[in-house]
Amino acid sequence: MAPPTPHGVGHNNVETNADGMLRFKVELRRQPGARLGIDVVLVSSLQGSGLVVESVSEGGVVDEWNRKVWEPFRIRAGDFIVCVNGIEGNIQALGAELRSDRDISMTLQRASTD
């Protein structure tokens, strides 16, 4: 299985918005049948709908990504997935897209520690 590559990762892919949330994009390349390796929980709040990362499993595509990139691009428990391959707001569609065999382009958000 080819590891995910941090292609296109740069400072333009991360921002901190007015409410102190860090927002960043990741690009995950995966082979058909490769497991993403994250557990997520569906959530809906006043801030919007999305998925929260519960855990990252060793040996999955996300774990491989995390080993190749630097902070803040490492995906970790508590990250809020707001967009997957252009899909936003529909948490069932977000989950379905993550379960697909396609490459994943996703936007995540977390509380900024700066």
Image: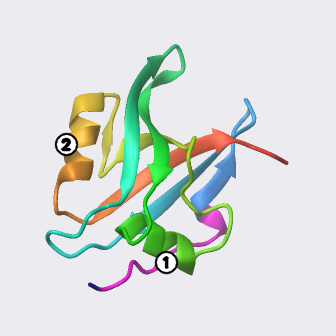
Seen in the picture, residue 2 relative to 107 is either above or below; the reply is below
Q: Residue at x 28, y 39 (%)?
A: 94
Please give the label number shown on residue 52: none
Magenta stretch in the rendered image: 2-12
Mark 2 or 1, nearer chain start: 1
Please give the label number shown on residue 6: 1
Query: x and y percent of residue 108 in the render?
Result: 51, 47
Mark 1: amino acid? Pro
Q: Are marks 2 and 1 in contact (CB under 8 Å)?
A: no
Query: x and y percent of residue 97 in the render?
Result: 22, 48
Is 4 part of what is drawn in magenta?
Answer: yes
Q: Residues within 10 Å of mark 2 (few under 14, many from 20)?
A: few
Query: x and y percent of residue 87 in the render?
Result: 29, 41
Query: x and y percent of residue 49 in the render?
Result: 41, 25
Nearer the observer, disc 2 or disc 1?
2
Q: Quadrant of the N terminus?
A: bottom left
Of the pair 18 and 35, the residue shown nearer to us: 35
Q: Which residue is mark 2?
A: 96
Q: Say what secondary structure mark 2 lies in.
A: helix
Would residue 1 be found to the left or right of residue 109 on screen? left
Mark 2: amino acid? Ala
Q: Residue at x 19, y 63 (%)?
A: 102
Of the pair 92 and 106, the residue shown nearer to us: 92
Distance Cα–Cα, label 2 vs label 1: 24 Å
